[in-house]
Structures are given as structure tokens and as C-alpha cells.
Amino acid sequence: MTGTFVGMPAFPAAARDALADTQLRHNLAHATATIRGKRAAVVGEVEHWEALRLAGAAVKERALHGLEDHLVRLEESLVARGAQVHWARDAAEANALVADVARRHGADEVVKVKSMATQEIGLNEALAAEGIAAWETDLAEMIVQLGDDLPSHILVPAIHRNRAEIREIFLRRMADVGRPAPADLTDEPAVLAAAAREHLREKFLRAKVGVSGANFAVADTGTLVVVESEGNGRMCLTLPEVLVTVVGIEKVVPTWAELDPLLRLLPRSSTGERMNPYTSTWTGVTPDDGPQEVHVVLLDNGRTRALADEVGRQALRCIRCSACLNVCPVYERVGGHAYGSVYPGPIGAILNPLLHGIGEGTGDPQSRSQVESLPYASSLCGACFEVCPVRIDIPEVLVHLRSKVVDAHRGDRVPKPEALAMRAAAHTLADAKRLGRAERLAGRVGRLVGRRGTTPRLPGPGAGWTDARDLPTPARESFRGWWRRTGGRLDGGENDG
Amino acid sequence: MADARTQVLGRVRAALAGTAPDPEPVPAPAGARPGDVVAHFAERVADYRATVVRCAPADVGAAVAGALPAGARVVVPPGLPEEIRAALADPLVDDGLSAAELDRVDAVVTACRLAIAETGTIVLDHRPDQGRRVLTLVPDRHVCIVRADQVVADVPEAVGSLDPTRALTWISGPSATSDIELDRVEGVHGPRHLHVVVVEGAEPR
């Protein structure tokens, strides 16, 4: 595995490999169950949780509906408070802006707060190409970076690694990039965290340039907000002389007062805490306190494309809490890498296609098919909508995006096997006699394969289905057959049917 | 070709063409209001493995001194009340110390702007009695004095009374990570010890 999502296979192929990894499935099941339990406990404490969700969703919806005005106002208030504002249409522009700031200060390294936006644009790789090292300072991000690995969860990116692996990574790699791990390093979490503290403190104390994202950007005051746990965020936001913050344009909150429901919803949904250990807010430059040169990069990179999708637009409300990952039966079994993006799980399954576009194919065929496979990476069970603190109807968007994928391929010269199967299904389901014949045929198959409960590997194109899924054995008798035989009464003859 | 700003704003406008204007704001429900906000705060911040001491106004100096290991090198912000500073043996007063200098200090003692009962949170707005942001970040032990009349019930009350143009730091327990197999470990990069001295004797809001 290398540290980039470029060239990832489509979801079904990636999921098949992940499913074969029993250790991964065990780690994920344990981790997601733990976070689910913590979240449920602290959400249960809040008397008006539903009303809070409605308020949070409304804040973000209001922000999106008036986005142009809010962005202009955000820029004005930031500039008034001494910040320099830049706009970036895409990843390349944003990366170039950050690199330019670092270069102007002669910095060959920057310290980074964990940020989804900078991961999305591949900032670390872009800076490396300019000879600038970007050090991830969140413990999990550091584990991923040192391991030349990929993040697999929004909140706990190294969720797929156990303590023994982390110890091995620290021993093997820390010395290459700074203060080595102590020789007597054990795999105790406290000992590993202490090694990370020593390793990174050296970098914090000498860093000239810090880079962050922002959880929220308040339009009427120009206030940026970073929510975190470890204090690495405070370090990056406070110690360097220069700070660059990359903010997706959907992070805008119209007013300071409207942060309230979001600051109540986020920690409980995310880490299952009443409040995260540290929240930092800053508004431009604070004289004699913290960075005296402050830049803000306002990033589009597909967000306006998502905004134009009337059904999909709601995905831009996302506050990156990751609650939807932890309740998703699909995510729990395949993990984050299978989604081929920094945004995994249910939110990734809608956000990636919305940001990249379906059927607007400027990308290569492989990345296009990867993106178009994501709306199908779901059982549509709806658990993600139930936990979403800003009420994003993920199942609705998934179905909407599936229809867009189908529409985008109507003109294909060679139809996909699913399309052929669906046409056959439509033909069968449209006529009762045809359906009855199909059911009798299925019943014979059921008798043939016996009592195993699941069918063995299907032949032909059907193999693609059974390779990664259990297919229940067809019932030996159809419902209609059973009704004809019994008149709707149970076999014992009791007439309660 | 248009500049990035013009083009991004143009795309936003085009994406929202025909969309209904701003929906009305939906008021957020009020937060929880426990009967005794001070006791609730003390309980909640202790839940994050912070050490909490409650004392009378006359005993603040002793409580602060008691929160410090013997021989600890202590730094204080320039505006820390004199009666508290007097209880400390030869504290360093921050006059723009470098981060490297602060790294050699054992503890910091500050006041706060307010505290939130429901979430066990202390909020600093970095006035002279709290000091610059770096002061409460680099030393390994933070002793924070919270007056009972500074405790508010919940987040909405806190947001309503804070000045967003000031840099703010919200602190809920010592720094912590759960990144290794979801085992919570206190103290990664920020202070590993948070010691809260709650001063009774003033009426809560």
C-alpha cells in the first residue's frame, strides 16, 4: 500500500480483499461497537436531541442557501481582522497557495493539524514535490504517515492498526524523520503516546509555518474554529509565526450564535464525549499572541458541483463527525480503504460522487468506475441517517446517485451485467405468469442445493455477486404455491393465517 | 479567464439559481440547567480525569500551592490576581517568554473567562489574568482557578456571553487521545495534568 488513493479499484474489488482480512474485521467490529456505545450514552443524556438535530441541520442549510453572501462576508471580516484571504478553484490551486506561503518564509517543513480538506487535496504530496516536508501531528495521522499508509476512518484514521503494529512503525521510522523512538518502547498506548509527544514537540518548537483546516468559519465575525483532543491542534495554531488554514467553502456558519447547536452536536456524535478536550477559535491576527501572519484559503474543489445537485446538496452540511461510519454494516465489514477516498463510509459513498461528478467523466475510466461504484456500497438500511447530527438523508442521496449512474450508462454500447439482470428482472416481475414460472424454477434450485442455507458460488456473471456475499438458498416452495396448497393455513391446520 | 474568487462565487450563484432564499433559522433548544451548576461543573470536569478542589475565597492561595509539586518551576500571566501570586514561591511572570523557555517550566497558574457545567469545560479568552495561548499549552501542568460566579449552565449560555473577536480556548480535561485501539490516554501534546480550583462563596449566575 502506498500513501495515495490514486488508482484504487472500484468498491466491489477492494471490498472483496478487505473481507478476507479477518483481523481487520475483528478490529473494526470492536472499534465501531465501542464508539457506538459511547455515542449512544452521551446522546441519551440530551433531553432535546431531535430538536438539536433540526436546529443544527437548519444552520447548515441556511449557510448553504445563502452561500455567496456568507462567503463574501466571511472574506470581509477576515480581512478586517488582519487575515489574508485566497480562493482556490481546485486542489492544485490550493496546494500552490500553501506552498507559496511556505516558500516565501524559507520554510522547508510545516506542522499540520489533522484536516480532511488538506487530505482531500493531497497537500502533503504536493508540498513534498516542492521540497517541503509536511508533518502530521495528530497521533493517528502520524501513524498513517510514518507507516506510508492510508487513513481508513474520518475520526480515527489508524483504526485498522493495532498497538503492536504502531510500536513497530515508530521504531522503524521515527529516527528517519526526527527524534528516534526510545529503544525500550513498549506497545502500551501511554508509552506510545509519550514517544509521539517527544518526537513531535521537537517539531512544534522549531516550526515556522503551521497548516490547519477548520471545522467552522463564522461569516459575520471571521472566526475560525478547530475542534480536537490531543493539543496538537493548539500547538500548530499557536506556536508558528505563520498559519495557513484551508477551509472548504461549505464550512461557513452565518453567525457566531449559530455555532451553538453545532458545538453541542459534534463532540457527542463524533467521539462520544460531552465536549472534546480542546476547541480553539481565532479571528484573524491576535496581536502578540500566536501567529502574526494568518492566511485563509477558501476551497471549492467540487463543492459547487455538489451544491448544484438539488438532492445531493445536503451532503455539504456534513460536519465530519464520522457517526455514520460507526453504525454502517458495510463499513464495519470492509473498513475505510475500500472506499478509495479520504471520505469513507456512508458519507464518502455520497460525497465522493458529488464532488467528482457522475457521468461528467473528465477522470480516467478507472477512477470514474471507482467513484460510480460508491453509491452501491450500501445496504440502504438507514442507520446513517438516524445518527447524522445534521440529518443528512444519506439513503435518499444514495438512491438518487444510483439513478444518475444508471442514466449515465444508458447509452453504453455494451450494457453492464447488472443492467442486463435488471432488464431480465423487470421482464419477469412485470407478468404474474412469468414470475410464477421463475419461482418454480428457483424452488427446484433450492431443492438441488439442499439444506446448506446459502448457495455455493454462482456461475458466469453471477460469480461477481457470490464472491463477496452469501446468497440465501431460494425457498423450496413459492408463496403462491404454499397458498394454493394450504389455503393460507399453517401446516398444523390452525386457522390463524 | 476570470480569477478564482470571481469564478468560485459565480459557480455558487449558478448552483443555487432558482433555489428558495435562506430558510428561517430554527431556534436551538435550551441547554440543560442543573440545580447546582457549580457542583455539576465540578463533577463533569472531574469525569475527564481533571483534579478538582473546591475551596473558600480565603483558601485559594493554599489550594493553588497544594496543586503544585514541591519545587515546581511555575509561570503565571502578568494579570494574575496578586493574592494568588503571593501564595507561589518565586513564580516566573510571562513577559513574552519563548516556547522553548516555557518548555522548561513545570506548571502554569491562570484564571479563566467562564466554565460550562453541562460539559465540564473551562473557557479562556486570554485576558491578562489568563495569559497568551502558548502559556497554558506548553507547560505540562495547568492549574486553573474558576470562581463559582463564572460557571454557566450550558454551551448556548457560554456562546452568548463570549466575545468571538478574541482568541478563545475551550478546555475539557487534560489533553487526550484514543487513537491506539480506542484506549483513552491522557496527555499527548497539551498539558497532561489539569487541576481545577473552584472558588466558592460567590453566587452562581
Image: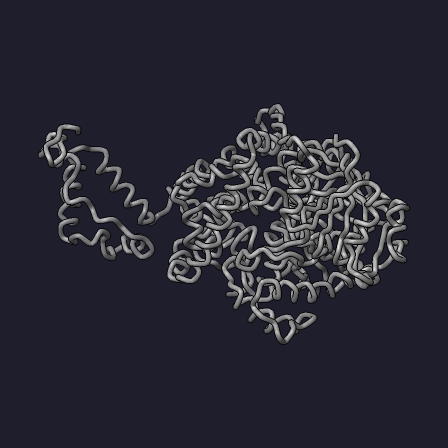
Question: In the rendered image of this protein, does residue A59 appear above or below residue A119?
Answer: above
The image position of residue A86, as x and y in percent, is 73, 46
At 52% across and 46% down in the image, what residue appears? A38
The image position of residue A186, as x and y in percent, is 58, 70
Question: In the rendered image of this protein, does residue A52 appear above or below residue A454?
Answer: above
Among the 4 quarters of the image, the one containing residue A313 = top right
Return the residue nearer the eye: A387 or A426. A387
Q: Quadrant of the C terminus of chain B?
A: top right
At 33% across and 55% down in the image, what residue appears? A468
Q: Report whether A332 appears left or right of A253.
A: left
Q: Farthest residue in the bottom direction?
A: A183
Q: How is the image coloured?
A: one colour
The image position of residue A236, as x and y in percent, is 73, 55
The image shows a total of numbered marks equal to: 0
Question: In the rendered image of this protein, does residue A316 appear above or below residue A27?
Answer: above
Among the 4 quarters of the image, the one containing residue A170 = bottom right
Can residue A76 be spotted in the picture?
no
The image position of residue A232, as x and y in percent, is 69, 55
Among the 4 quarters of the image, the one containing residue B69 = bottom right
Q: Quadrant of the N terminus of chain B?
A: top right
Return the residue nearer the eye: A292 or B123. B123
Return the residue nearer the eye: A9 or A166. A166
Can residue A141 be spotted in the picture?
yes
